[in-house]
Image: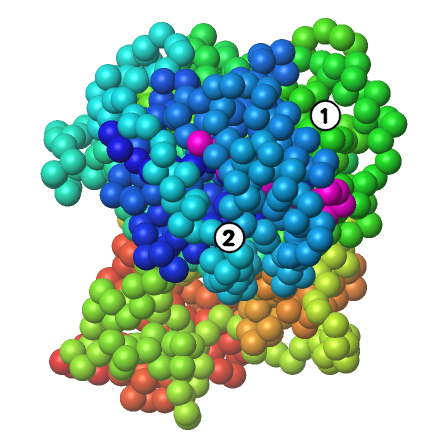
Amino acid sequence: MTLPRLVVAAPSTGSGKTTVATGLMAALRTSAGLVVSGHKVGPDYIDPGYHALATGRPGRNLDPHLVGVDRVVPLLLHGAAGADIAVIEGVMGLYDGRLGTDGFSSTAHVSSLTSSPVVLVLDVARMSRSAAAIAAGMVAFDPSVRIGGVVLNRCSPGRNADEIRRALDRLGLPVLGMLPLDPSLATPSRHLGLVPVAERDESVALIERLGEQVASHLDLSALLEVARSAPELDGGPWDPVTALREGDRVGFDTASLVPHDAGSTSDAPVGRAAGAARRRRVETNTVDDANARPVIAVAGGRAFTFRYPETEELLEAAGCDVRSFDPLTDPTLPAGTQGIYLGGGFPEMYAAELAANTNLLRDLRAAVEAGVPTVAECAGLLYLAESLDGVPMAGALPAQAAMSERLTLRYPVATAPSDSLLTRAGEQVTGHEFHRTTTSPPAGPQPAWLIETSPPSPEASRTSAETSPPSPETSRTSAETSVVAAEMAVLDDESRVSRSTSAGSVPTSANSADATDASADGTDASADGSDVSALVGFASETLHASYLHVHWAGHPMLAARFAAAAHRAVPHLSAMAGECAGASAGETADSRQGGKVSPTGTDGALSDPLRHHGDVEIGDGLLDFAVNVYPGLRPEWLEQALHDSLASTGYPDEEPARAALAKHHGRECDEVLPTAGAAEAFTLVARARAWRRPVVVHPQFTEPHAALEQAGHEVTEVHCRAEDGFALDPAAVPDDADLVVVGNPTNPTGVLHPASTLRGLLRPGRLVVVDEAFMDAVPGEPETLTADRADGLLVIRSLTKHWSIPGVRAGYVVGDTAAIRDLEWARTPWSVSATAAAAILACATEHASAEARKRAEEIGAWRGRLEAGLRKLEIEYVPSTASFVLVRTGAGVREALREQGIAVRRADTFPGLGPEWVRIAVRPPELTDQLLRALEGAAAAEGRQ
């Protein structure tokens, strides 16, 4: 096949290859009107990003180590399909390859494999005729490499330029152009190299300027002649469909592409990623069947810029629908996600922004825990960790990540230690690592890879110790040595790791986008002269996460297995689905009034019964028996605490309240969590995990049920029956329930379940949540579980009702530390206001405990008067221990009471109850007597009808 092409190379890093290569791509596209294909020797992701911007096509990598020698030409032809010319940017020095391999995977190696002529870039800012001597050595070193001409970088017309040109003319090497110094072409660097194009707002302008400079100062016609001198290439382009079908894995035995269901060879789960792998049978698996195309969510945006385009092409060829999402801005994974791919990037630079997107973190974690097939490479590994430099991440892996002083550079062959989502035990792949972070632990119970590396050479150690930090203009001998020491000498010459320890990034010199020195102060290699073997990463039947980057074109069985797992996976339902639906599912603008659910529609029906609360029952002139808030005045000390909380202009600090709660209940601080009322706690429970079968025991406060549905869960209801006194039968709860929510005392029945009954609900793998929002109304709190340190038990408490502060929204959770941690992870920052924190702190004292008991006893007396009156009227009720009584008045009595100016809480919004029931809040004697007289009159009126 005919393909005009050339390789842009240099004697060393820091010569300006990226500047010349990228500028040439832009110039050929804009000035010459050609379709240009950009390629990069080696594993580097950053330069292909600039190439893509310059050419308008995906940047491609050509790396014999990653894909195998026989795949280099087919991948070149594949990437250059439809192009007029291919420009290949080299890596490091022209002949620099893997240590001990005579230049394997070097720029010269790729030039020979592709029969591509070389354009040699010489930085002549500090030399004259010596430039020709260097070029002569480059020409003579390997006759199989044809150098078609030279570009002089950082060189302007004048006597020195003429001297260099004459010397090169004697060698028969034409000068194809001279690129003068231009400070506007300086590019910022980072701890792993140039700032990716997706992160540079000025990238387009930079590429345009590069193209203009190259068009003005280089001979495009002569360069095109060099490219057109390349001979025809044998063979055809790489094809992802063929690669998948044939299991075209270069350099290794072909593995079966049919995923098996045997699962992992290790029984050990991987932390929170060990959720059950839910499966579905795929009846059709063809690219043409849109219904059979599972959605693969691929992380993109500014924080995740590194991935090979062939990865997506393989997944698409395997029948997947690849969709990008931005972890910085998107609130959820793409709808119906059945597979997740998290590639490379710089999450450490965006840790705060990633952590702030709590909705997506929560959604991602839920998907991983639910068994959605997930692949994470390098940056993806950090994103799935519990934290990155102390900043919370997704928490899907039991590991913490942090920046390190040591740079890890590896170009290894990795062995799969066990079966996993991607691998089969004993298989080997080639890959690369390039990072300055570490994870603790480095591997999970089931590691992803066994990686073997070799120690640094004596020359490497000596050079590292003796070389002083060079200037940006100096070539990177130390950097090359560092890379060779890690057996990664073909690593991107734009690895450009700054030696500055005070700034994090150093601008590169003008016209030298690859000029920043790499660190030579330490790489991850053995120092004792022996080979190093390390188990790294995390793997399971549905997960594969490690620092290792693998080019799937060289190992297409990985793509095939991932795609097959995605085809089998259940589509992920994002927890935000209900919220994003807005006013759907029949909700109208008139059904909500100021955040309250309208009590009735025009036909008396409720649009959203689970969201109905007693506050909408009351109105002007109505006597309130609907809301359970204690009707007395707040204590003076509480009033003062609330008032004082508003004096500060700082952000809320809940830690003093947390410490006070821990002391109050005899718990550790990690066993308690302040919340913005019980309602927030229920929302956190709903969103914290991917519940498989959540159960709510009814009749029960409906907020937990509503929160679970809003989070996308299907709720199983267990009903306590009136004929049983609404007592709980633990046997009625399904054995496979992994979440059980029950009230105690229960709202609206007021029934106090024995603590032993609730303990009987506990099971391995199940979380039992006990809503004790009204326990403080029970003198002595005899059945409370706040002191129980049982695994899988959470108790939710509220201060709202007992302390008459419904406008403050203050509550807390007590219980299992792991569950508390999950809730804390799921909530937004500063959800507990300063006023709420002050209320919690004030109410967690001995003085407050005495006052709380006094109120409970008073409530008990009021409740006794109400129940005695109901018995006298022969009105059925449920004996209560709370601040309300569930009464069976008969249908129509609630409306009759409203006509008499009394509001009671309708109870038909509680699952398991009908319109004949109402809930009546207890009140002082004079008000209770007024209610009883009204009830007597209403009952008499109903009897006459």
> Which of the pair 379/573 is nearer the observer?
379
Q: What's the residue at 72%, 6% (across, down)? A: 530
Q: How is the image coloured?
A: rainbow
Nearer to us in this view, 776 or 131: 131
- In-image side of 203 versus 552 (left or right): right
The answer to whether residue 844 is seen in the rendering is: no
Q: Residue at x 39, y 10 (%)?
A: 252
Q: State which quadrant residue 30 falls in.
A: bottom left
> Where is residue 415 shown, x and y percent of the image?
50, 13
Question: Residue 897 lies in what quarter of the image?
Answer: bottom left
Which of these two is toward me, 115 or 878? 115
Q: Position of residue 692 (x, y in %)?
A: 35, 38
Can residue 34 be seen from the camera position used here?
Answer: yes
Q: Which residues are magenta?
A: 117-128
Residue at numbered disc 1: 481
Under circle 1, the secondary element is helix
Residue type of the residue flagged with mark 1: Thr
Between the residue at mark 2 and the residue at mark 1, the CA separation in whole angstroms equals: 32 Å
Residue ID at (31%, 68%): 582
Q: Hey, which quadrant is residue 891 in on the image?
A: bottom left
Q: Is residue 468 magenta?
A: no
Which numbered marker is on residue 218?
Answer: 2
